[in-house]
Structures are given as C-alpha cells and as structure tokens.
Amino acid sequence: MEPRAPGRPAARLPIGTTSVTHDLGVYRRSVGMLLASLVARTPGLAHGVLLSSEGMPLSTSSGLPSERAEQLASIGAGLLSLADGAGRSMSSGATHQVVVEMAEGVLMAAPMADQLQLVLLATRECDREQLGYEIRGFAATIGPLLDNEGSPR
C-alpha cells in the first residue's frame, strides 16, 4: 500500500485479507474481465478457463458452472502435458497450442506463461484463425500482469 498523506487515515483492506490476498483478488477480477471480453468478442467462442499449470481454474468465463470449469481445466492441463511430453520425447520443442476437433465443437488449449494455461471451447463453425489471433492477443495482454514465474505482480 502507498504511504498515507499527513492528516489522512490509512487505507483499510477488507477484514480477513492481507495486501497479498487483496492484490490477488484484484488480479483475478482484472483477468476475469479480460477473459469475458475475449469470449464476448470472438464469434463461436462459448467458454474459456484460465488455469494454473497444475490444472486449477483461476478464472472462468461467465455461464460456465464451476464443476464444468474444473473439468475443462483438467482436460486442458492434461492435453498440454501430453503435448509437452511428446515434444520432449520427439525433440520437437515446446507446445504452442493443442486443438481437438469434435463433432459439435473445438477445444483449444495453449500455454500463456510458465505457470498459466488457457483452455477454450468453441463451436465447430468458429473461425480458428481468428481464435488463434485472439489467443495471442490475450497472452500479450495478460503478460504485463505477471512476473517471470507467471504469478500476479
């Protein structure tokens, strides 16, 4: 927190929070708004989840029930882990994204930073080039919010 000006009371955090938990809450709200904007402006994109590399959902798009968000996060983390393992064993480098085409939709997973991943669920009619473009833009937007380990600044 900033030092207080003379004669002004110190700013107070909500009861039960520290500056670290308060900063994390602000970060999650900011990322949540960015994720909501990504879903809203991308035709055919139904849901998105930003997750930790361990598969824990950190932020989800609105309208996605928490149990479905956890499932989508686990699926995305698993797919990225498999792709990373394949890249290492075949000496073909780091994973940029994983795309799964299904009868009624597309699932796309991509690493965002060392500790973050993004999983998106879209209709099969969605423009995949635009989706890829939007993912790169999202990564560039959240990058400045993170330190070198992928944690909130």
Image (cartoon, rainbow, N blue to C red):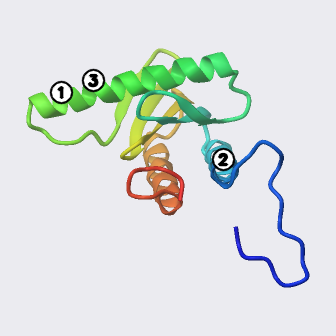
Specify few, some or many for label 3: CA neighbours under 10 Å numbering under 14, 14-19, or 20 or more: some
In which quarter of the view is residue 50 placed?
Answer: top right
- Mark 2 is on which residue type? Thr
- Mark nearest the camera among 2 and 1 is 2
The residue under the point 47% across, 26% down is 106
Find numbered disc 2 in the image and state the secondary structure of the residue it sits on: helix
The residue under the point 18% across, 27% down is 86
In which quarter of the view is residue 43 placed?
Answer: top right
Residue carrying label 2 = 21
- Mark 3 is on which residue type? Leu
Find numbered disc 3 in the image and state the secondary structure of the residue it sits on: helix
Residue 123 lies, with reference to residue 102, above or below; the image says: below
- Mark 1 is on which residue type? Ala
Do the numbered discs 3 and 1 sit on residues whose CB atoms are within 8 Å? yes
Residue 145 lies, with reference to residue 47, above or below; the image says: below
Question: CA–CA distance between discs 3 and 2?
Answer: 33 Å
42 sits to left or right of 77: right
Do the numbered discs 2 and 1 sit on residues whose CB atoms are within 8 Å? no
Residue carrying label 1 = 86
Specify few, some or many for label 1: CA neighbours under 10 Å numbering under 14, 14-19, or 20 or more: some
Residue carrying label 3 = 82
5 sits to left or right of 102: right
Q: Say which label, 3 or 2, has the lower sequence index.
A: 2
- All told, the count of numbered labels is 3
The residue under the point 68% across, 44% down is 36
What percent of the width, then of the height, locates residue 116?
Answer: 44, 42
Question: CA–CA distance between discs 2 and 1?
Answer: 37 Å
Q: Which mark is residue 6?
A: none
